[in-house]
Amino acid sequence: MKRLLLATGLVFFLSIISFSQILEPVKWNLSKKDLGNNEYELLFKATIEDTWHLYSQFVPKGGPEATSFYFYDLQGFEFIGEDINIVEEESYEVENDIDYIVSFIEPDGYEEEDPNFNMVVKFFGHEATFTRKFKITTEDPLIISGYVYFMCCDDSKCIPPNDENKFEFAFNGAKLTAKPDAEAKDESGTVIATTEFAIGSLDDSEKSSKYKNTYEILDDKTILESAGIDDLANKSLWELFIFSILAGLAAILTPCVFPMIPMTVSFFMKEQKAKGKMQAIVFGASIILIYTVVGTVIAVTLGVNFANWLSTHWLPNVLFFLIFVIFAASFFGMFEITLPSWLINKSDSQVDKGGFSGAFFMAFTLVLVSFCCTGPLVGAILVKAATGAFLEPIVGMLGFSVAFALPFTLFAFFPSWMNKLPKSGGWLNSVKVVLGFIELALGLKFLSIADQTYHWGILDRDIYLAFWIIIFMLMGFYLLGKIKFSHDSDVKFISVPRLTLVIITFTFVLYLIPGMFGAPLKALSGYLPPMTTHDFDLDKITRQNSMAASGVEQSSSICETPKFHEFLHLPHGIEGYYDYEQGLVCAKKLDKPIYVDFTGHGCVNCREMEANVWSDPQVLKILKEEYVVISLYVDDKTTLPESEWVMSSADGKLKKSVGKIYADMQIYNFNINAQPYYILLGHNGDLLAKPRAYDLDIDAFVKFLEEGLENYKTGNHL
């Protein structure tokens, strides 16, 4: 334990050092070479640290920032043309000053796929020297000055460029205007140039750049601790653990597993009573160990950074949807998903050795043999867990394995209990088929997330509900014996437990049907597409017709048409914005505080908050009348035009999509990446109340909104 604590402390200490150190991966040495006849050559040598690289002057559009050499003035000298890598000098205007971009001759470098920009670009490693010849055309004292604008990256991060890397060269007896950090001198000892500078640390990303920096919405850049995030994380872990336990118990009732209980228990009963019980404990512990190791491997290999990609990108979500459909087809009896027979035979051969090793390999054999039934359930847990943080896969597999192993261990301890078990039969296959219907319904959630994130428009709320209604109606008819699959036995009568399931299923179907006409279905709000995707909202139509009949015009709480309104929407008729800067301008104009909602298309808890808390009349009245609402979607994949790209102050990478920009904003300002997250702000970034996360307490949410409103009116803030 002491070693573990020491190692943990060391990792934590090193992580603090790594984040606080100043990164200077590229240093420059600038010099001039006298060629005679008033001709000179400039040599700009970049020394680049290992694993880092500097980009060429010529990079594809949409890629990294090119290395560029800017000159403030071209009076008193002229550049001498070359045949290699020479382009026409161009100028651009910044703050009413003209700077000139001059191309230099550059080394060959490398042209490879860059993981930061997903394109082939030219770059340099270790060192690169850029040269350009010129001729002095005046006899007066001359200073040639400018700056180098460049960007450097390694395989995982970039340091944003800036224009603070200035240089000066003195000719004809001129004196430099400022003392450089390091100096180059001619043979007489006269300073002739600034010879060395380095790109700054990540803090320098706030300096001027072609791209605007990460939005900084807090006036004093105060990093806040999470508001309720720890409680939410604990709640989510418990929910996952309970879900996993239920999945483990369901796996026991499948035809691949249930018949193996008496066979397995009889193996332990052959031994002496004490030894048999000990082997049963080892058997159960081995099952837990095997599944938990799988969860740990998932956690270590995927980790937290992979979670966002899994939860929002179309590829894994569509893949998960297809996997669930395939598992459902397997449960319906279309085919069986099995592992290679040699693997099962190899494990089974080790069981005969007996002892504790025999108990372990018997557990391993059970895991392999039951894969065709447990695989879909384990897959569902891993899919649910892998979209969370590090602990989720481990907790999920632990819960499943404990529930899965417990019956085997208990029956080995108390073999007389087996007499009370129901006999194997057709009911086991019915359990399997019912699980197939549930898998099919749950699989639609992943397709829905991809559909919302990428705005495909193929699985709106009403279409989604139609699928669920049909799936669960078919499940109800199956339980009644009206539908039969190839492996099913005839249903001669309906037992009371089966009738209970029929009643529950058809009740659920009747609950879903009003949702087709705009009913909110609050109990399922986190698992259904948002109401804004519903084509036929009867409540909305009735409200609009009532207002039209009364001659009352709906007042607007916004100043102009919101950006992204074509594909982003707020619930319950709330008007607001989806761009922070646009919302801030409107809040100042209307003299209202700002309600910032960090949300996401795939955020289940966000939908539950909107359906159960935002819909409250008092909450809705305050949001509509007293605040300017800004919903920022952290997982939206819409790519912005280049002029709106953001160079992150948090990780130094270029953010090109709506979601990445606002996810970066949340992390940079609040050190939190969980949604939902609600912030109340004044116009200067002053915090009006402690932020809130997922919490269905309506009274507490009203107090939160009222506190922010009161502090805005009185000028108080945290």
Image (cartoon, rainbow, N blue to C red):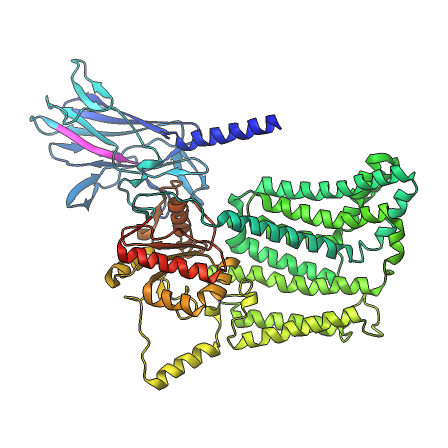
Q: Residue 387 at what x, y percent from top left?
A: 56, 50
- Tell me the magenta residue range: 143-150
Q: Is residue 717 magenta?
A: no
Q: Is residue 144 magenta?
A: yes
**383 and 181: which is toward the camera:** 383
In the picture as drawn, the residue positioned furthest to the top comes out as 188
**386 and 241: which is toward the camera:** 241
Task: Name the side, left or right, on which 222 lies relative to 423.
Answer: left
Visible residue check, residue 334: no
**477 and 102: which is toward the camera:** 477
> Relative to residue 494, is residue 439 depicted above or below?
above
What number of labels is visible? 0
Task: Name the side, left or right, on which 492 lies relative to 244.
Answer: right
Q: Residue 699 at what x, y percent from top left?
A: 45, 62
Q: What residue do we see at 25% from left, 63% from top? A: 590
Q: What residue do we see at 54% from left, 54% from top? A: 315
